[in-house]
Image (cartoon, rainbow, N blue to C red):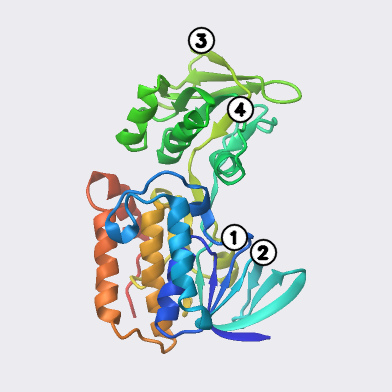
């Protein structure tokens, strides 16, 4: 049995920042991630971030990951890192089990912080399992991590920020994007991203969804059709594209299995991507000393995930007796940053979602 102050599960933007924040408070951290390299989604993101200087605005995700890892190493005496390690379960006695290097390990922390992120949603249509049909994350991994083009002609399904950004990255790599489609009546991503690909001649078709995929043994054609104002398909509006890749980018859903097993109170909140934990302003769930941060507590941009990580790590450390010397100032600064990131019309959905899961601090 391994005993530590705080276990952080997930080494993406939220988990890295939570580990930095808690370690800087004096807590002993065990950071667990199932991937070979820390950074999560950041290591495949080559676009420049929005936000403010505090969230590394105008830096690329791949560079931000390196900055955070370097910051983490400043506290290497306080942090143990397990990569290629999968957290298997959280049990009633507070023990976490981990599959690490083909060994079954049990860890007993004073507190834990879950930053497992989110997984891509799928879209149901005939032959949606044909080779050549990918999630946007898989396409980013192929191109930006391994330098491999997924194909020659791509239909992008989804006009949110991820779909628009990946479309632009495909174009930069010399891949033809025949169109971007979205079932909603208007695009969900930022206009700046949409303008980039429109200027490169790519049509964005709103109010359309996939009817079917055609091909054997792999994707050869994609058929789409228009939806009416009740989201029903309209016969006779079909359009067909000759493509060898269909990229599905229809949103993310929080990875909350560990929280469910731990018995945390959960609530389905569409604005936050699905089933999420009820939490307080310190990011503590209904279970004492189980904290959350990042997409597992509600799908947002990576900038918000980083700030949530800093805030949750700060509060988790304090809950077990490690109060940062500048706790009050730092906490208020992180709250202010999150309020700024969630301000305006674009943040309204997130604000509504968070209002549905907040519980009072006891």
**In this rendering, which labeled residue sits more in front, label 3 or label 4?**
4
Q: Which residue is mark 3?
A: 236
Q: Which residue is mark 2?
A: 84
Q: CA distance from mark 4 to mark 1?
A: 27 Å
Q: Secondary structure at mark 4?
A: strand
Quick one: which residue is furthest to the bottom in this view? Answer: 321
- Looking at the rendering, which quadrant does residue 87 occupy? bottom right
- Where's residue 276, x and y in %? 47, 59
Which residue: 56% across, 85% down?
Answer: 4
Q: Which residue is mark 4?
A: 245
Q: Secondary structure at mark 3?
A: loop
Which residue: 55% across, 45% down?
Answer: 120
Q: Which residue is mark 1?
A: 37
Q: CA distance from mark 2 to mark 3?
A: 50 Å
Image height of 274 relative to 188, above or below: below
Q: Secondary structure at mark 1?
A: loop
């Amino acid at each position: 049995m391994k005993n530590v102050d705080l276990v952080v599960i997930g080494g993406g933007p939220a988990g890295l920042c939570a580990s930095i924040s808690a370690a800087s408070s004096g807590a002993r951290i065990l950071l667990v991630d199932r991937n070979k390299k820390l950074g999560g989604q950041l290591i495949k993101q080559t676009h420049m971030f929005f936000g403010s200087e505090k969230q590394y605005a105008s830096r690329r995700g791949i560079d931000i990951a390196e900055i955070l890892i370097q910051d983490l190493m400043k506290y290497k005496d306080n942090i143990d890192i397990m990569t290629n390690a999968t957290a298997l379960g959280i049990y009633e006695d507070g023990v976490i089990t981990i599959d690490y290097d083909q060994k079954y390990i049990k860890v007993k922390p004073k507190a834990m912080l879950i930053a497992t992120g989110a997984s891509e949603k799928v879209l149901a249509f005939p032959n949606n399992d044909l080779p050549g049909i990918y999630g946007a994350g898989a396409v980013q991994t192929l191109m930006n991590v391994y330098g491999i083009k997924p194909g020659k002609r791509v239909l992008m399904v989804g006009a949110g920020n991820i779909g628009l950004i990946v479309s632009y990255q495909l174009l930069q790599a010399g891949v033809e994007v025949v169109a971007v489609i979205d079932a909603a009546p208007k695009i969900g991503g930022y206009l700046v991203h949409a303008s980039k690909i429109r200027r490169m001649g790519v049509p964005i078709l709103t109010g359309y969804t996939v009817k079917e995929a055609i091909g054997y043994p792999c994707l050869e054609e994609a058929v789409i059709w228009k939806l009416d104002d009740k989201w029903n398909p309209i016969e006779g509006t079909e359009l067909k594209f000759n493509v060898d890749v269909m990229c599905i980018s229809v949103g993310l859903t929080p990875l909350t299995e560990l929280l469910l097993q731990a018995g945390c109170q959960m609530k389905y909140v569409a604005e936050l991507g699905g089933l999420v934990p009820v939490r307080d302003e310190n990011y503590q769930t209904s279970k004492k000393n189980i904290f959350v941060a990042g997409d597992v507590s509600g799908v947002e941009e990576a900038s918000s995930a980083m700030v949530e990580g800093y805030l949750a790590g700060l509060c988790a450390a304090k809950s077990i007796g490690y109060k940062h010397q500048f706790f009050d100032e730092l906490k208020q600064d992180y709250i202010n940053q999150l309020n700024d990131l969630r301000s305006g019309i674009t943040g309204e959905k997130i604000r509504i979602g968070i209002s549905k899961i907040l519980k009072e601090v006891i």
